[in-house]
Amino acid sequence: MPKNTLAQFAKLMADPKVSAILKATKSEDGLTTKQISALTKIPNNQLYYTINKMQDADLLTIVNQVQVKNLTENYYSSAHLSDETPRFQSELDALDTDLTNISGTWTQTHIQEVLQWIMLLNHDFNETFREEMADKQPDEASIF
């Protein structure tokens, strides 16, 4: 995620289009821009800029490419973000088997990624909280 500054990443995470796209693309098979547009109700021509920004921030990956006549159709997925572990899990595993023990040196080296990961987790919590409060009685919500 080093292509974006922390401020750019935060701005991206605050965009309602990003939230809708992240929610729509959780499948590992991915979706085309046309499919994303249909699910999110965002016009196709408004998706390309946001999708490019999301790719730069590693929020979306291209999981498949299909040649349709003379065009390449990309399938985008955010499934890699749904895992319970960070993108750099192999580096963490190499440090220590206790994942709560992350060295200060490692954290300092990966500060941008760690902060962006925390923002992503907070974003997921906020979206789930909002949905739970809208769909259920407050006392029945499980997000707490």
Image (tube, rainbow, N blue to C red):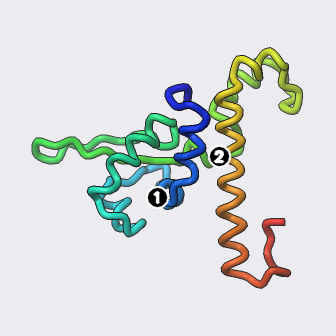
Q: Residue at x 32, y 54 (%)?
A: 33
Q: Quadrant of residue 144?
A: bottom right
Q: Rate crowding at label 1 as few (under 14), some (14 to 19) or many (20 or more) other CA atoms within 10 Å.
A: some
Q: In the depicted view, which residue is nearer to us: 1 or 11?
A: 11
Residue found 77% across the figure and 23% down from its top: 107
Q: Is residue 26 visible?
A: no
* Residue 34 image position (x, y, % from top left): 29, 59
- As drawn, is 132 to the left or to the right of 96? left
In front: 134, or 11? 11
Query: Total number of numbered labels?
Result: 2
Q: Badge 1 is on which residue?
A: 17
In what element is the residue under mark 2?
A: helix
Residue 127 appears at what percent x and percent y? 65, 62
Q: Residue at x 46, y 58 (%)?
A: 17
What amino acid does circle 1 point to? Answer: Lys
What residue is pinned by disc 2?
120
Q: Position of residue 142 (x, y in %)?
A: 80, 70
Above or below 106: residue 51 = below
